[in-house]
Amino acid sequence: MQLVKKENLPSKMCLVCNRPFNWRKKWEKVWDEVKYCSEKCKKNKKG
């Protein structure tokens, strides 16, 4: 297993709050589908 430093992890911008968020292990298989930084932003998404 190869370790990756935090500063080298991929990141995206949240569609709701426009803040950057980094890759998380729990998103490993669905990273392309992740659009929101948190459940709060997901619930407050613009319709």
Image: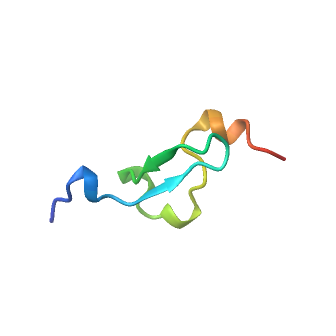
User: Does residue 26 lie above or below 29 as drawn?
Assistant: above
The structure residue drawn at horizontal position 16% and vertical position 59%, both measured from the top left corner, is 3
The structure residue drawn at horizontal position 50% and vertical position 56%, both measured from the top left corner, is 12
Q: Horizontal and vertical percent for residue 33?
A: 58, 63
Q: Does residue 40 appear to the left or right of 47 in the view shown?
A: left
Q: Which of the 4 quarters of the picture holds residue 28?
A: bottom left
Q: Does residue 32 appear to the left or right of 29 in the view shown?
A: right
Farthest-out residue, front:
18
Disc count in the image?
0
Colour scheme:
rainbow
Q: Does residue 34 appear to the left or right of 6 in the view shown?
A: right
Q: Does residue 2 appear to the left or right of 39 in the view shown?
A: left
Of the 4 image quadrants, the one containing the N terminus is bottom left
Q: Which of the 4 quarters of the picture holds residue 17?
A: top right
Q: Horizontal and vertical percent for residue 19?
A: 54, 43
The structure residue drawn at horizontal position 60% and vertical position 37%, both measured from the top left corner, is 39
Q: Horizontal and vertical percent for residue 36?
A: 59, 47
Closer to the camera in the image, 6 or 43: 6
